[in-house]
């Protein structure tokens, strides 16, 4: 007999059905003639309550031996529950202990554990209510993202993870090498001791990608609308609740598209994913609303319907200068917008998601399209309450001469970008795209406050355990 998933049997339609349930014991209580087992299989937040009579064959071994954390398989009949708090219960005809669990050393006890503690047992934390719910929602959101782009005819692009080009020109990349770090080959005649990367595996300095954008641009210049959804890496030493060294990014890139078209897509995209998760993960969201972040469901409902606000960087700076708010990082035209500013703008000034556009060129990347007046670029960041930046994007510089100039002004070498410049020489079109940090999206959906708790195994400075 095939196992039923618990989510499929916890309803009145199942009354009278014979089923096999396979899962892990959350708790067991023993009465005089029978035991209650709460079984969870990860298919949903809820457990199924099993009633196992003491008269079952092998009761001592299979039921009384099934401590919290054990794996069991239960054959039985679904009945309308007599008890409070659940609609159905499973009256066992046979219980089989599949995997024992040593009660004295099992780290997940009935009490509530802190997320900090659970990070130290990241291999077991998916068995908790919180993490089960996080990763079901993460999965649903990932599916919704592919669905959104697929329905709109975007081609899914697997951009490379190892790269010899640096998207931002800003460093902070993880080196990929097979050179002997104790004795790397040196450039001949160079007593300064420069390392000879031509003798490295790829014949050049290679790194883990910080973004698939440049590659996506090449494919958008042929397939029109593409997106990447893959791992990205940043060696920035920022120990914040919103930064990981390895995270997943969604990057659409559209040909024949400008900044406004880019924002329209970002808005539709975000609303679509939120709507999908609201519709498909209601019970898990309810859990977050109750235990993690009060009001998260209502906030998502609101965003799923709202028009997102838009303001230029200059307007954002004025708004902050005119507010009575004291910021830790001073506000003036030309300054980078910090998390505290982002939160002020979305939480207090707008009270919802807001696109900030047209940033000073000095604080943005070389590939962003230069605006008229040449002070700002056609960039946009989407700021949301609680998190700040969730999306960063721009219209790309499609004019070859301007791009060449910007590469120079940013102090970058032109040579590595020869193919990127080629796109501007052969059938160049206005194009635009953005990057969404997938973990930030999951934080936004769940109300979880630390990015380490929405990725299976977080990689942060000083930690790549598991
Ligand atoms: P921030 O200012 O928050 O560090 P950024 O400006 O460096 O972000 P981009 O380079 O524009 O971010 O990357 C696009 C998106 O990727 C961001 O909007 C954010 O959602 C996400 N992101 C960036 N860096 C990280 C990181 N270290 N960990 C997780 N997500 C990230
Ligand atoms: Mn960053």
Image: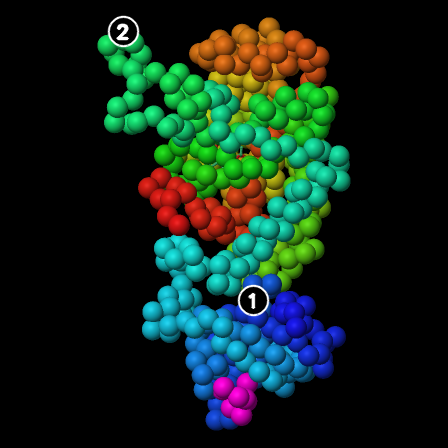
Q: Nearer the viewer, residue 334 or 194?
A: 194
- Number of callouts in the render? 2
Left or right: residue 233 versus residue 312 is: left
Q: Nearer the viewer, residue 297 or 365?
A: 365
Image spot of residue 452 (x, y percent): 44, 48
Lower position in the chain sequence, tag 1 or tag 2: 1
Tell me if I can see residue 220 in this picture.
yes
Image spot of residue 440 (x, y percent): 53, 43
Q: Nearer the viewer, mark 1 or mark 2?
A: 2
Between the C-alphas of marks 1 and 2, the distance is 64 Å
Left or right: residue 101 versus residue 35 is: left
| Residue at the (75%, 36%) spot, across then down | 152
Q: Considering the numbered disc 2 on the image, is that residue within a helix, a strand or a loop? A: loop
Q: Is residue 447 magenta?
A: no
Disc 2 crowd rating (10 Å Cα; few below 14, some 14-19, many 20+) is few
Residue at numbered disc 1: 41
Residue at numbered disc 2: 189
**Vertical placement of residue 432 versus 345, above or below:** above
| Residue at the (67%, 46%) spot, across then down | 144
- Segment tinted magenta in the rendering: 52-59
**Viewport quadrant of the N terminus:** bottom right
């Amino acid at each position: 007999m095939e196992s039923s998933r618990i989510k499929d049997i916890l309803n009145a339609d199942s009354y009278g059905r014979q089923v096999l349930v396979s899962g892990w014991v959350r708790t067991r209580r023993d009465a005089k003639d029978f035991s209650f087992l709460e079984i969870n299989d990860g298919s949903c937040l809820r457990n199924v309550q099993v009633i196992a009579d003491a008269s079952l064959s092998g009761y001592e071994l299979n039921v009384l031996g099934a401590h919290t954390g054990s794996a069991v398989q239960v054959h039985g009949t679904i009945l309308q529950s007599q008890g409070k708090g659940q609609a159905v219960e499973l009256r066992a005809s046979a219980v089989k202990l599949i995997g024992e669990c040593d009660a004295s050393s099992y780290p997940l006890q009935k009490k509530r554990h802190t997320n900090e503690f659970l990070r130290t047992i990241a291999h077991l934390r998916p068995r908790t209510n919180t993490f089960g719910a996080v990763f079901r929602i993460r999965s649903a959101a990932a599916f919704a993202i592919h669905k959104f782009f697929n329905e709109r005819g975007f081609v899914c692009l697997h951009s490379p993870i190892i790269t010899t080009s640096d998207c931002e020109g800003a460093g902070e990349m993880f080196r990929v090498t097979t050179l002997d770090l104790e004795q790397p080959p040196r450039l001949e005649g160079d007593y300064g001791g420069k390392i000879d990367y031509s003798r490295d595996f790829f014949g050049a300095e290679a790194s883990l990608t910080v973004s698939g954008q440049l590659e996506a641009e090449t494919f958008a210049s042929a397939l029109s609308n593409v997106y990447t959804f893959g791992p990205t890496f940043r060696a920035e030493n920022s120990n914040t609740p919103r930064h990981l060294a390895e995270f997943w990014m969604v990057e659409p890139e559209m040909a024949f598209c400008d900044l406004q078209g880019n924002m329209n897509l970002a808005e539709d995209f975000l609303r679509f994913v939120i709507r999908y998760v609201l519709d498909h993960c209601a019970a898990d969201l309810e859990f977050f609303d109750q235990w993690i972040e009060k009001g998260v469901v209502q906030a998502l409902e609101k965003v799923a319907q709202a028009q997102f606000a838009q303001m230029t960087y200059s307007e954002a700076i004025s708004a902050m200068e005119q507010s009575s708010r004291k910021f830790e990082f001073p506000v003036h035209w030309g300054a980078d917008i910090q998390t505290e500013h982002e939160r002020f703008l979305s939480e207090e000034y707008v009270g919802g998601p807001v696109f900030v556009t047209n940033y000073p060129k000095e604080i943005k990347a070389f590939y962003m399209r230069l605006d008229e007046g040449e002070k700002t670029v056609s960039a946009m960041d989407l700021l949301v309450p609680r998190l700040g930046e969730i999306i960063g994007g721009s219209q790309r510089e499609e004019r070859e001469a301007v791009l060449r100039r910007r590469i120079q002004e940013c102090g970058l070498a032109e040579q590595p970008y020869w193919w990127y410049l080629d796109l501007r020489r052969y059938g160049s079109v206005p194009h635009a795209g953005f990057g969404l940090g997938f973990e930030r999206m999951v934080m936004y959906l769940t109300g979880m406050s630390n990015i380490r708790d929405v990725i299976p195994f977080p990689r942060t400075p000083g930690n790549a355990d598991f």
